[in-house]
Amino acid sequence: MEKMFMRVDEVMAALDVSESYAYKLIRKLNKELAKTGCVTIAGRIDRKFFYEHFYGTQAYEGRD
């Protein structure tokens, strides 16, 4: 079973971006999540939320 949250190294690998840019994306996505009332963790992003925003729900579900 995959972990619920992605760390910066997983975001870097999934998008082939630098560490600083991955942190920037995580901060941006966490701001969006916080607006919906969700609790966020600095430096981590909910895996499902990440894949929905970058690849759509279907792409995420196909990875399991």
Image (tube, helix red, strand yellow):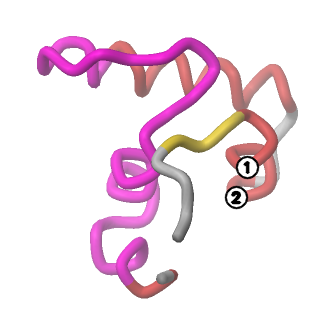
Rendered residue at 56%/12% (across/down): 42
Rendered residue at 13%/20% (across/down): 36
The answer to whether marks 1 and 2 mark residues whose Cβ atoms lie closer than 8 Å is yes
Magenta residues, start to end: 32-61
**Could you say which is closer to the camera, residue 15 or residue 45?**
45
Location of mark 2 (residue): 14
- Marks 1 and 2 sit apart, C-alpha to C-alpha, by 6 Å
Relative to 43, say whether 50 is above or below: below
**Could you say which is closer to the camera, residue 54 or residue 47?**
47
Residue 19 x, y percent position in the rendering: 85, 29
Relative to 61, say whether 9 is above or below: above
- Position of 44 compared to 64: left or right? right
Location of mark 1 (residue): 10
Residue 55 x, y percent position in the rendering: 43, 65
Relative to 39, say whether 7 is above or below: below
Secondary structure of residue under mark 2: helix
Identify which amino acid the numbered label 2 is placed on: Ala
Give the image quarter of residue 61.
bottom left
